[in-house]
Amino acid sequence: MDWAYLDNNATTRPLPEVVEAVDQASRELWANPSSVHRMGQQVRQRIELARQSVAGLIGAAERELIFTSGGTESDNLALFGVAPLDKLTLITTKVEHAAVREPAQRIEKRGGAVAYAGVDADGAVQLDSISALSEQHSTPGRTTLVSIQWANNETGVIQPVGAIAQALQARRDQAADAGQRIKLLLHLDATQAVGKLPVDVAQAGCDLLTLAAHKFHGPKGVGALWARRGVRLQPTHLGGAQERDRRGGTENTPGIIGLGVAAAHAKAFVQDPDAIERVRALRDQLEQGICQALPSTVVNSDGADRLWNTTNLGFPGIEAEAVLLGLSEQGVCASAGAACSSGSLDPSPVLLAMGIPEPVAHGSVRFSLSRMTTPADIERALEVVPKVVGRLMKTLPTG
């Protein structure tokens, strides 16, 4: 079966160049990069070249990058590493990925404080809520960490990260004018943004940033946390001095090298507006075609600034799982939210937090494209989706 793969926010197909680099590293660069002999130092050199490539993708200094096993570990290191939990206040939202939502719950259980900023009906963070909470909770003697997902994995909504950073800086300036010393940090979960949007950590005004290779055609099981120089982190992985004592454990050499290759290609892609617009046009074609064929379709977050590759469509009264199974039988891959939450019959907590009615949230399906998506993929989806959803609609009770 020829698959129309439209689940790229879950994972992307590795580039051929990435596969080749990972294979070559597995066969030839297998020595331990911490060893002092020449074989080990050859591996170390390749890791540092990959670090340079990833740093270039996000406008960072190389020494500020910490290689990890992926986005979840990077988020955990950011949230658990900046301060003892009983001296930490986390400000976040209820539309975050589980890699932030679940650590937030643990922070509360371990004596920390968590406050949730409001979001509008599209899932965009309300800046006045961020400002009010940062003023209320950033006090001397505590660390206050604001953690926001730059681009939402389910809806594609792009948060106003620059404005959020400005609001936090205003609070820092206010505290300084009052003679107070506060520690107020901004963490951006950029797992869905890096490789899709131009990202520059200096312009973003953040202190920590998360990325994962497999979201931009790199290998799974590898990612990075960027920590601005001066931000001190307590490691969550102990047992070695790797990554400047911030993440113990022998490095995943093939994965890191693959990440470096993917980063170089991603940098070229995000600097090519024509390439991005080609995929955006395919996304719009898919979204408009489904809405025309199925007029009751709800486009979630259609009033917000969204990633060019993502559309989240609600089919009221239908179970999303039934839609996904029907699509899969016809060779179309999509999802009903975060891939790591698949198998749950509950509606997406992200959509519910946005105030989307439960019958719509239950029937919401995410279609996400990549730079490898073809017009044939969209044509296949436009042929299959209306048939599958239409058949399910006929089973709905009437009256």
Image (tube, rainbow, N blue to C red):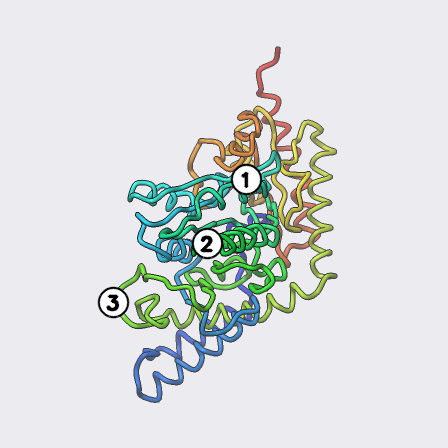
**Number of the front mark, 3 or 1:** 1
Q: Nearer the viewer, residue 377 or 258?
A: 258
Task: Decide if residue 211 is in sight here.
Answer: no
Residue 216 x %, y %: 55, 60
Image quadrant of residue 343? top left
Disc number placed over residue 239 in the picture, else none:
3
Choose the circle earlier in sequence order: 3 or 1. 1
Q: Where does label 1 land, which residue?
A: 129
Dot 3 amino acid type:
Gly
Real-space CA distance between mark 3 and mark 2, rounded to the nearest whole angstrom? 30 Å
Q: How many marks?
A: 3
Residue designated by label 2: 184
- Return the residue found at the far left: 239
Determine the residue positioned at 67% across, 54% down.
374
Q: What is the distance, in whole Å, between disc 3 and disc 1 at their CAs?
A: 40 Å
> Can see residue 156?
yes
Q: Quadrant of residue 169?
A: bottom right
In this rendering, position of residue 297 left or right of residue 345: right
